[in-house]
Amino acid sequence: MTFKYLLLLDKCERYDSIKDELHMVLDKYTLNWYNSLPNVDIVKEWSKINKYEDYWNIQKNIKTTITSKSGCSYCLSFKNKKTNTFLNDKKEIRLPNNIFDAEYIIWEGEKNKEKYSSIVTELSKYFCEGKDKDNWFINDTLETFLAKKIQDAP
């Protein structure tokens, strides 16, 4: 973490050579992304990783994925959990090919997805519990609004 702070605070290039050696922080956001990768053993919580070998395998999988020659993309779109469909056209961005830079994109994206899910859940409780007539708000108005916001994002 010390090196990550140095890289963030000191914008000079003298630390760039260590970017390829850094590990991704394993928290609920980065693990959520990691668990979405194909052919990985699902890890629910970082505190459940009991063996260094397991930790090392996760880091190797992450590094292989991010630094692959074909590149790695990150899906920015939000998924409707009820219908299992994307809120908008599946919007993806290409991740940088080093873990240091990719981690910040993944972390922020997963955090925003969690916020979206929380908003939809709370609004569903407020508007839709036992009132089918108000489902239009969640299904149409909110999703249209959020889809437009995502499309307008840089």
Image (cartoon, grey):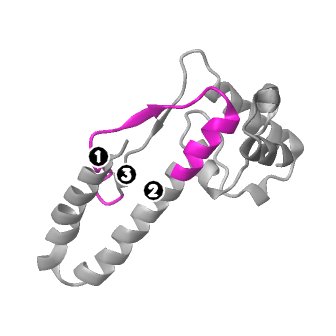
Q: Do tag 2 and tag 3 residues touch (Cβ < 8 Å)? A: yes
Residue 104 magenta: yes
Kindly tell me whether residue 35 is visible in this rendering: no
Residue 58 magenta: no
Circle 3 sits in a helix, a strand or a loop, which is it?
loop
Kindly tell me whether residue 119 is visible in this rendering: yes
Whole-percent x, y for residue 11 in the image: 72, 38
Mark number, residue 152: 1
Is 141 situated above or below 108? Answer: below
Q: Earlier in the sequence, mark 3 or mark 1?
A: 3
Distance from Cα at disc 3 to Cα at disc 1: 14 Å
- Chain part drawn in magenta: 81-108
Q: Earlier in the sequence, mark 2 or mark 3?
A: 3
Distance from Cα at disc 1 to Cα at disc 2: 16 Å
The residue located at (42%, 44%) in the rendering is: 76
Circle 2 sits in a helix, a strand or a loop, which is it?
helix
Number of labels in the image equals 3
Q: Nearer the viewer, mark 3 or mark 1?
A: 1
Is 18 situated above or below 132? Answer: above
Q: Which residue is mark 2?
A: 113
Q: Amino acid at mark 2?
A: Lys
Whole-percent x, y for residue 78 in the image: 37, 51
Q: Which residue is mark 3?
A: 78
Whole-percent x, y for residue 53 in the image: 86, 39
Mark number, residue 89: none
Q: Nearer the viewer, mark 1 or mark 2?
A: 1
